[in-house]
Image (spheres, rainbow, N blue to C red):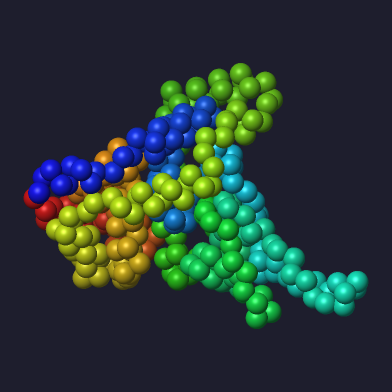
Amino acid sequence: MEENIFENRLDLRALNEQVNRIRQELSKVIVGQEEMIDLLITAILSDGHVLIEGVPGVAKTLTAKLLAKVIDVKFSRIQFTPDLMPSDVLGTSVFNLKNSEFEFKAGPVFANIVLIDEINRAPAKTQAALLEVMEERQVTVDGKTYSLESPYLVVATQNPVEHEGTYRLPEAQLDRFLFKILVRYPTPEQEISIINGHHQRKGQAPVDEVQIVLHANQMHEYRHAVQLIHIEQNLIKYIADIIHETRNNPSLFLGASPRASISILNSSKAYAAIHGRDFVTPEDIKTVAFPVLRHRIVLNPDKEMEGLTTDDLIKQIVDKVEVPR
């Protein structure tokens, strides 16, 4: 039996080599955000969207641009504002005088990596326009459906501090993000590296610093390899136990959905793969549980008043649920 398992082990050397090259290219510009970079790579391999939260100036937008450059895919950026309409995002039908027919003019969501800057600045109607795009990778306008090219990744950013002129994201939309990544301030040492890097570029655009590492067709191969990563049945139960605990925790007003279970499964496989393993460990599940759950659970108001955060509660839940041996 062991011999059979050995023969069927996945060869992840090419994937790991490319992941390391992506890390190296991004680290030319991005300093001290290794966790964010690893989670973004994990999200791409898991075919999931990412919400990045952080104060202005911590390279949220720049990282998404650089990621599109190293993967050599089409990139578009949408700045969300209170007056943005759904047609500004999805596209619209325009009357062509030459043939007297309506033609669809595709909006900026028709790319491979779509950066939505300050997603919480657009009203509910515009945010709702993204629901079909993010879940089904398609756009329906005037009764006609248009498919989006794969790979397709929405990277949205939001500022946790500024609330004036913002609209809270509905739970249904938050649930469509695979991860919510928190970007924190750099350390003093990292800050010095950032300043030195900017000084040495002498005005050169940061995007010009990085090189193309892989192409879209290679990404499809690696995604397929990730789906073949092995996970023991007791670890599948471990995921279910964590999710079940969020639904029965007295500190929570809203627990995680079944989509969260699938998200932990897919992302733990991808996280294992980028670290050179063809099998999932409990540590992989624990690591991805935080970005998967932090935007899907809602604390009771009294717990928020006590200063408890969603990450605090996720840690309590992960520590409480027994790890399979």
Residue 12 placement (x, y as % from top left): 33, 39
Whether residue 269 can be seen here: yes
Residue 139 placement (x, y as % from top left): 60, 70
Q: Residue at x 65, y 54 (%)?
A: 79
Whether residue 251 sits left or right of residue 141 in the image: it is: left
Residue situated in front as seen by the camera: 281 or 205: 281
- Number of numbered discs visible in the structure rendering: 0
Whether residue 308 can be seen here: no
Residue 77 placement (x, y as % from top left): 64, 51
Residue situated in front as seen by the camera: 214 or 172: 214
Q: Is residue 69 above or below residue 234?
A: above
Q: Quadrant of residue 166?
A: bottom right
Q: Quadrant of residue 32?
A: top left
Q: Residue at x 34, y 54 (%)?
A: 227
Q: Residue furthest bottom?
A: 143
Q: Residue at x 44, y 56 (%)?
A: 48
Residue situated in front as seen by the camera: 218 or 241: 218
Whether residue 206 sits left or right of residue 161 in the image: it is: right
Q: Residue at x 22, y 68 (%)?
A: 244
Residue 29 placement (x, y as % from top left): 54, 29
Residue situated in front as seen by the camera: 243 or 236: 236
Q: Is residue 141 above or below residue 156?
A: below
